[in-house]
Image: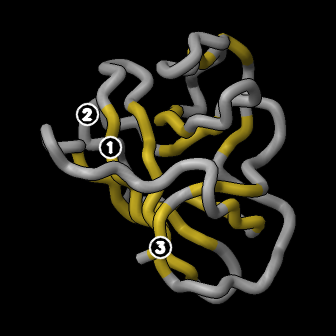
Amino acid sequence: MKHGEGTQITVADETTIFVTITCAHTGHPMVGRLVWDGQAFVLIAASKQRPGSVIPDEGKHWRQAVYRVHTSYRCPQCHASSMIQCGQCKALCCWEESWQIVSCPRCGQSNRRQGDIQSLSGGRG
């Protein structure tokens, strides 16, 4: 699993992207909003997915950049303070540094944090 701070910097074409994040505890999807701050895309908020609403496109537009999580961010479902990316299916889920092992709510892979997120797929803002 990879934590939400990337290491590769590239020029961003847009200032906001929306990604699907799944709560690691409830398994419910959310839409995460990341805003370009001039150096990185910063996860500033996530909202619960409403029945019938559209989730961001996945796998179509991958962006390589630095990714961070704002210090005020909290998962609206379990209140975790960060996000992590599954090394197997590339799905995002919430994460807390105190969690030794993270299980991906999408594919079930369990692992420890390894490295940083370097690319994400989502919709443009």
Q: Which residue is found at the position 19% from the left and 49% from the top? A: 53
Q: Which residue is mark 2?
A: 77
Q: Earlier in the sequence, mark 3 or mark 2?
A: 2
Disc 2 crowd rating (10 Å Cα; few below 14, some 14-19, many 20+) is some
Above or below — where is 116 with respect to 34? above
Q: Earlier in the sequence, mark 3 or mark 1?
A: 1
Q: Secondary structure at mark 1?
A: strand
Residues under numbered marks 3 and 2 in contact, where contact means CB atoms less than 8 Å apart: no
Horizontal arrangement in the rendering, residue 48 relative to residue 66 (left or right): left
Q: Earlier in the sequence, mark 1 or mark 2?
A: 1
Looking at the rendered image, the disc whose residue lies closer to the viewer, 1 or 2, is 1
Task: Compute the Cα span from label 3 to label 1.
Answer: 16 Å
Q: Which residue is mark 1?
A: 30
Which quadrant of the structure image shows residue 102? top right
Q: Which residue is mark 3?
A: 124
Task: Compute the Cα span from label 1 to label 2.
Answer: 9 Å
Residues under numbered marks 3 and 1 in contact, where contact means CB atoms less than 8 Å apart: no
Depth check, front residue: 20 or 95: 20
Above or below — where is 39 with respect to 76? below
Where residue 86 sits: x, y (%)? 66, 30
Task: Compute the Cα span from label 3 to label 2.
Answer: 24 Å
Q: Amino acid at mark 3?
A: Arg
Residues under numbered marks 1 and 2 in contact, where contact means CB atoms less than 8 Å apart: yes
Where residue 28 sits: x, y (%)? 30, 28
Horizontal arrangement in the rendering, residue 2 relative to residue 27 (left or right): right
Which quadrant of the structure image shows residue 119? bottom right
Q: Amino acid at mark 1?
A: Met
Q: Secondary structure at mark 2?
A: loop
Q: Amino acid at mark 2?
A: Gln
Horizontal arrangement in the rendering, residue 74 relative to residue 34 (left or right): left
